[in-house]
Image: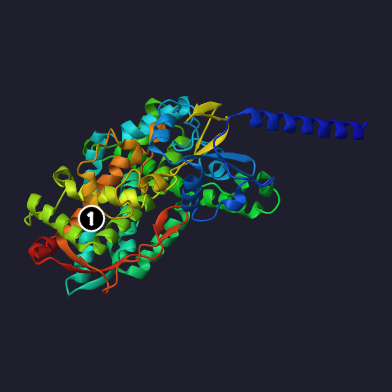
Amino acid sequence: MENFYCYLAFFLSVVFLVIKLLHSHNQKLPPTPFALPIIGHAHLLKQPLYRTLETLSSQYGPILYLKFGSRSILVLSSPSLVEECFTKNDVIFANRPRTMAADHFTYNLNSPVWAPYGHLWRNLRRILTVEIFSQINLQKSSIVRQEEVHSLLRLIFKVSNRGPQRLELRYLFSLLMFNIMMRMVAGKPRVGEEAAASMDVGKQQLKEFRETYAAGLSMNICDFFPILRWVGYKGLEKSMIRLQRKRDKFVGVLIEEIKQKKASSSLNTTTITAVEKKRTLIETLLSLRESEPELCSDDVIKSIVLLMFVAGTDTTATTMEWVMSLLLNHPDALQKVKAEIDSQVGHGRLLNESDLPKLPYLRCVINEALRLYPVAPLLLPHFSSKDSTLGGFQIPGGTILLVNAWGIHRDPKLWEEPARFKPERFEAFDGEGERFKFIPFGTGRRTCPGAGMGVRTVSLALGALIQCFDWERVGMERVDMSPCFEVLLSKAEPLEAVCSPRQSMTTILSQL
């Protein structure tokens, strides 16, 4: 009898496989390379993946269908296909694939980035757009960004006031972003000015913090070959569990500190009124839970706090590093930015966020850096909830969607001299009519809600650094622009530059 059930299971498995093969054969799938049994196209996918997919798309077309282990992958590298996908089929592709990282890092998929499309996601998205990233709240949090930029200026001035100094900008940009995010979330900087001034101490603190929060939600080999999760990669999953425990403990301490602070301040109504205008993110979420407890659970609060650290620190710091590297390699563009700031802001005060609309060339430089070096070159993956049609092809439900922003941003059919740094191309850029060919923050329902704050921060920080200091390359050689793709598209070598205070700004810098 036992053998009978084994044979029956084997027979049904074969029948199911044959039916599936016949079904896929009858479908008009997008172009696909030759696949090997079991592993599919895994043998073709070399690092960096965005470059490999760009090469495959040049051979097979802008819509490409791949099999990687048990998963089907759709790759798009055409603005027209991206537009069709995120307008006509936007709801179908509004989900995220289930991954090992999502299982352990998102508090049971309560993260706005990874929650399934539906009622929960819409509520989480509303919290982000209304309570955190709305224009009103960005204006309220501008004081935090301004104060931390001033702290950075003080630090650099102390170091460079004695003469030109060689500085590692990756450290300084990371320091700035972790302190901004920590103050927005919990009301205190991560690395104090004394520790920051001691580079070794500051770097060690940032290293420990980054090891905890830099790990994102990227897919790994176990997501495509699930059997490995139980065979040879148990250690990977155990390390994720340990990391999440560490994250959860840290976030829990932050929340508990805010609760105690709130309890003590409730005894003094004057104090409440004074701090209400500058509430931290945790305070905002705790207040929201009082009015909507079913919406803002402990898991939701923790997931949003973690999201701010994971998605809002290294991404912005990395963008700053790319922008500054490009400006150092193109001194004419650097001088043009400096002249624009001098003309619109002058030397009598420091640049602030209200000046940014008057600095269009600075924004063009940032956009050009995002075009050439998008921090997420394949964006975040999407997942189709059911069968659909795209570009005249049938796309099966359960397909992972990757949008190759790198390939679109460097397509010679879309951009004149695509590999050249040319900020002027964005002076006449039609942000609405051409939006699907420039997608550093994604597009559609899942577009990055923090894009506005990210661009503000990059603009303010770089604008202030250029206003206050003269910057030069270390030596005569150009800055090495070789990328290193791990979780983010970052520079392989940390950026270093020679800095000296501008004579016209020394009085203001000495008064900070």
Q: List x then y, in percent, for residue 425.
A: 23, 47
83 or 339, nearer to the observer: 83
Residue matched to label 1:
462
Using the rendered view, name the quadrant where residue 322 is placed: bottom left
Q: Residues within 10 Å of mark 1 (few under 14, many from 20)?
A: many
In which quadrant of the rendered image does the N terminus lie? Answer: top right
Q: List x then y, in percent, for residue 226.
A: 66, 44
Left or right: 82 as drawn, with respect to 464: right
In which quadrant of the rendered image does the C terminus lie? Answer: bottom left
**Residue at the far right in the pictured view:** 1
- Please state which amino acid type lies under the numbered disc 1: Leu
Left or right: 122 as drawn, with respect to 495: right
367 or 394, nearer to the observer: 394
Q: Residue at (86%, 35%) from the top-left corner?
A: 6
In the figure, 13 relative to 141: above or below?
Answer: above
380 or 160, nearer to the observer: 380
In the figure, 468 relative to 366: above or below?
Answer: below
Q: In this rendering, does residue 294 appear at all?
A: no
In the figure, 23 relative to 211: above or below?
Answer: above
Q: List x then y, in percent, for residue 146.
A: 21, 50
Q: In this rendering, does residue 340 appear at all?
A: yes
255 or 58, nearer to the observer: 58
